Amino acid sequence: PRPIKVLESTIKETQDERAKIATGDCVVHWFKRDLRTSDNVSLSKASKKAKEGGVPLVCMFIVSPQDYEAHLTSAPRVDFELRTLEVMKADLQELSIPLYVATVEKRKEVPKHVLEKCQEWGAKHVFCNTEYEVDELRREAKLTKLCLENGIDFNAAHDDVVVPPGALMSGSGNQYSVYSPWYRAWVKHLHDHPALLAEAESISPNPASAKETFQSMFSTPIPRAPPNKSLSDEERTRYAHYWPAGEHEAESRLHRFINEKINKYKETRNFPAANSTSLLSVHFSSGTLAARTAIRIARSANNAQKLDAGKAGIVGYISELAWRDFYKHVLCHWPFVCMGKPFKYEYADIEWEYDNEAFARWCEGKTGFPIVDAAMRQLNEMGYMHNRCRMIVGSFLAKDLLIDWRLGEKYFMTHLVDGDFASNNGGWGFSASTGVDPQPYFRIFNPFLQSEKFDEGGEYIRKWVPELKGVEGKAVHDPYSRGAGKQAEKAGYPRPMVEHKEVRQRALERYKKGLGRG
Ligand code: FAD
């Protein structure tokens, strides 16, 4: 059975017994990728339970170096989370709610640690929001039982997604594998279940006495990043500049985007130099903002009640956020996609190149294709890349270089500040044509044409590739064949590492051959 089903049935089966458990001395909320105090389903439920029982709420967060390894979490992402914890700790402190943060070296010790802490604090109810990766779902199913054996009620809620996985089924009763019909079903489901977009109730303050009871938690500082995820001082300053942490920042970014940019989102979202997207992905993936909140607020700026009607910019924005849910549903239904397997088995037989030098040039942004290099350098500098460019570099790696897309997927996860397993896997599957609802394999982006179309004036390239700053006009898209070769060479900019027309042909043949064998 799928891990999500196992968790759901474990929760259902144990419901009656768990309901009998008395309140205990406190109620625990376990923060994971939901790092905010407002509009948080599980936190809100935990707060309500604590208030009803007249006991304090205690929050916890576990730093797990092995989880970071398993999820390929990037160092900038770990840094973002730890900076967010500082913000959250201060906000919770205002409400006399303690935040316990501990580093647990071994991944398998995490459930035991949660249990031991609950026992130490006399907590009888633990709440958390579900994470949808396989190991996490399995861990939570086990934890539900382990807690129950020890007289503790473990509750897992849906919060990271807007529509719970499994709620949308095609006519034949299966999970959709194509976005458009899935999106129509998603919109309909939200119209039929408006509570899914409602704001979770605000949390209540603890009695002031909690400050004394849990004194040590209030005074213990947030731990530092584990050594293999540490940033240098320069990097820390840089990432803090690009990505200020915490839910207040997320909220104000969302409001600025809705007030200033959303109406033009549909026409402008594909142009990387336009700075026209919300730049909220880091907040959605760390949970400093819920997708539900963004959709609700965006919708209130629309004249239409329907999610798919009214202002095109708002409809477009909501439909992009829906992709995030789509890929999480896919992950829950076909968990093998996050185990390095292509969605369609026939794509497992494509013969990839494993050319370390070529891969290194792609990683460093030294391919000689300016739009690809600009994008990779943006990623390496900011931990972020514009969506159009993610598709361009993905297609370039998988098709022009014929390098196994999984290496690109991994490089992204270990460098993105917004790394999200399901969306990243979905995006790579789309670009390499091996995933769910992908580009057809014969659609191979021409990086020069993509560049001319989406960075017409070359601003994005000049910003990220300083060697080409002085190259004027269209030559910036392909300096060596458009008359700026000497200038590019003098500045140390490399020649294109492959001939696009030739490698396009090679990719078509290789894909066809792989599919033929499959
Ligand atoms: P906006 O245009 O403002 O979009 C709003 C939100 O909608 C985003 O923040 C994001 O949460 C969601 N969204 C938009 N497009 C997509 C999409 N195609 N798939 C899923 N969600 C989407 N997104 C991640 O959050 N994490 C990843 O690790 C990730 N890896 C990707 C890898 C590849 C190869 C590709 C092609 C796309 C990937 N995306 C990923 C999706 C997308 O590129 C980013 O969400 C987007 O660029 C973030 O910028 P933004 O917040 O300004 O987006």
Image (cartoon, rainbow, N blue to C red):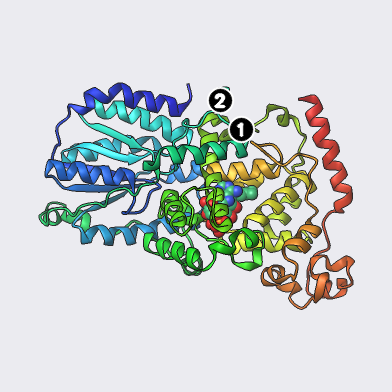
Q: Amino acid at mark 1?
A: Ser
Measuring from the top left, give residue 272's x and y in whole percent: 65, 63
The answer to whether 39 appears left or right of 137 in the picture is: left
**Quadrant, the C terminus:** top right
Q: Amino acid at mark 2?
A: Asn
Mark 2 residue crowding within 10 angstroms, few (<14) / some (14–19) / many (20+):
few
- The residue that label 1 is drawn on is 177
Measuring from the top left, give residue 131's x and y in whole percent: 42, 39
The answer to whether 350 appears left or right of 74 in the picture is: right
Does residue 374 appear in the picture of this structure?
yes
- The residue that label 2 is drawn on is 174
Measuring from the top left, give residue 163's x and y in whole percent: 45, 39
Name the foreground residue: 456 vs 76.
456
> Is label 2 in contact with label 1 (beta carbons under 8 Å)?
yes
Residue occupying the point 22% across, 46% down: 47
Does residue 416 appear in the picture of this structure?
no
Measuring from the top left, give residue 289's x and y in whole percent: 41, 54
Name the foreground residue: 150 vs 264.
264
Residue occupying the point 15% across, 36% down: 23
Residue occupying the point 45% across, 41% down: 191
